Amino acid sequence: MVTFIVRRLIATIFLLVVVSMVTYAVFFLIPRLAGQNSYQLATQYVGRNPTRAAVLDIEQKLGLNEPLWVQYGRFIRGLAFGEHYNSGTSSTYCPPPCFGYSFRSQQAVWPLMVSSLPVTISLAIGAAILWLVGGVAIGVVSALKRGTLFDRFSMGIALAGVSLPIFFTGLLSLALFSYKWPIFPNVTFVPFTQNPLLWARNLVLPWVTLAFLYAALYARLTRAGMLETMSEDYIRTARAKGLNERTVIIKHGLRAALTPIITIFGMDLGALLGGAVITEHTFSLNGLGQFTILAIDNQDLPEILGVTMLAAFFIIIANLAVDILYAVVDPRVRH
Amino acid sequence: MAVWRGRTKGGARDAAAPEVTDTSAPATSAMLDVRDLKIHFPTDDGLVKAVDGISFTLDRGKTLGIVGESGSGKSVTSLGIMGLHHGTNAKVSGKIWLDGEELIAASAARVRELRGDKVAMIFQDPLSSLHPYYTVGYQISEAYLIHNKVGKKAAKQHAIEMLNRVGIPNPQTRVDDYPHQFSGGMRQRAMIAMSLSCNPELLIADEPTTALDVTVQAQILDLMADLQQEFGSAVIIITHDLGVVAELADDILVMYAGRMAEYGTSEDIFDRPAHPYAWGLLGSMPRMDRARSERLIPIPGTPPSLINVPSGCPFHPRCAYAANTNGKSFNEVPPLRAVGPGHQAACHLSTDEQRRIWGELLAAQLSVADSDQQREDA
């Protein structure tokens, strides 16, 4: 088990390095290959209508005129130790982990992202708990009561949940529960540490909206998985032992059916932590998703680079967590 | 429909069984008394009569072999005795007395109490029948834990003891292994350990050796025979392999299309089979003691669909002797009748006719064997 985790950790670190290389290449190598020189590249980091001096200053600061491998080395060093951007005339410090410096907003990227992280994490975790519990529970009951009214009704709702886009269900929920019947009048982020009750109350609508989409997916998956496992031979064995039906379903059936759910749950949560773009935008929550939209709108390359790296990081870590969890759940993986 | 009453405890059977319709109490002191068991499944395509009137008895320490092709209702019979049809849409009728307690009318909860305790089961494929996520020891102790008031530690100790008994080396360490770390034969041994962990009075083995290597099959059968001696359980062995029942069974029930084709002692079925289907099964069974050049004789055709069972004798489309019955085979369902002491068959052929044909079949086989022997001698 320990060797398994160590092996996975090494693979994860390797993967992170590869991701950083690929991301870096997308932002710095490909423009070069497309024929841009370092001056043209530098113009993308300055802002609209820059002076020639400002562009040269940036070119110098970012070291865009240096060989690519030196630039990549500086990038990695910046992640670990921080980075001094120095053009001779002015010096800017970007503390570690330095994902880059947004010269447009005159700030290091990392603190900007960090400030929007609590929103995204609150949104993702809350919704994840809702959809995991709700989706799995509905899926299990649907599978056990296959063909009944409950099954048909919940699967119908699930189909709607999978099909309806968040910007529709989100706006609908806002219209109904924020304006018409103001049960949840404010959807603004209040930090958990400041007022947990208000934090939860203000996030109910985004949570439910986001969870609705995923719960629908998970209900369908769980139902299919349960139908399959409940017809397995080992379920018959469990019944033949004289176990009561609840033990048979939960200990023997659900345990096995949950394995694939864990996999996609990890991936979904990881992806959401990188920014629930549409949900955040629909509810005007200033999380990582909104940050991403703004960065793209402003063509703020360091910010886009930072958010890309962070999203990739979340997915890789989620992947690692899933792998380890998988080994905990399924003994065939760890031996 | 003639219902066979079952033999008395001594094993001598009441050959001239009268028509018994009173099924309010077990007529025998046999440990297991199944009478006119019917298990029907309503489906969209029609009623599937998976089991359609099965009666037999079984004493302690004895072994009954239920033989038949796939889809003859063997496994469904066993699931009915185990009460595992609860929760399905099966329509069950008839009587099953286990130690004087009737099981079909009993509540699902009561049957569950008996399951794994008094009645246990071994399944065909030990890999898919064991849960991949739990240790072998845990799965063995699970049954012991619910049927006995013991702690987890005692249950684990019991699991180790059971593993030891079924011949698993190093049971103290293997008890913590997962099924995938066991070989096929060891898994079936673990399965047997699990089923015997509560010292059941009745053990049902559904094709216990079918999924195993031939070399392991004999070991498992020997183990089952030994443990039966030790535990004194009654055993029902369900198989399509006559070799397995030849080795273990005291009595044999041949099933066809959910009905009883023939029922008798092991000697009855192997030495003087009365039903053409039994002849077919015996003819298609490879045997070491027969000549090599002797061809196996397959039964033509396939088992019938249980929704559209052929009219008359369900076996008549595949029976070479159906024409010898003045058309009765095509129209009338043959009742189960005595063809010898404690030996019954559901066939329209007269007993004399059956004896004559079997004699001819036997002679033909012997002559083939003789000529083969002569060729080898020459």
Image (cartoon, rainbow, N blue to C red):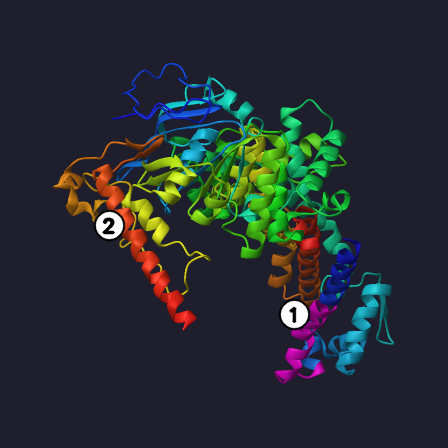
Amino acid type at mark 2: Arg
Magenta stretch in the rendered image: A17-38
Q: Residue at x 30, y 23 (%)?
A: B17
Q: Residues within 10 Å of mark 2 (few under 14, many from 20)?
A: some
Quarter the C terminus of chain A occupies? bottom right
Which of A84 and A87 lies nearest the eye of the viewer?
A84
**Residue A152, numbered circle:** none
Q: Residues within 10 Å of mark 1 (few under 14, many from 20)?
A: few
Residue picked out by circle 2: B318
Determine whether the residue tagged by mark 1 lies in a helix, strand or loop.
loop
Discs 2/1, front: 2
Q: Please say if A153 is above or below B10.
A: below
Q: Chain of mark 1?
A: A
**Could you tell me if residue A260 is visible in this image?**
no
Which of A298 and B13 lies nearest the eye of the viewer?
B13
**Could you tell me if residue A98 is visible in this image?**
yes
Q: Residue at x 44, y 34 (%)?
A: B78
- Residue A115 horizontal/vertical position (percent): 74, 50
Q: Residue at x 67, y 65 (%)?
A: A300
- Residue B258 horizontal/vertical position (percent): 32, 37
Amino acid type at mark 1: Arg
Q: CA distance from mark 2 to mark 1?
A: 90 Å
Residue picked out by circle 1: A48
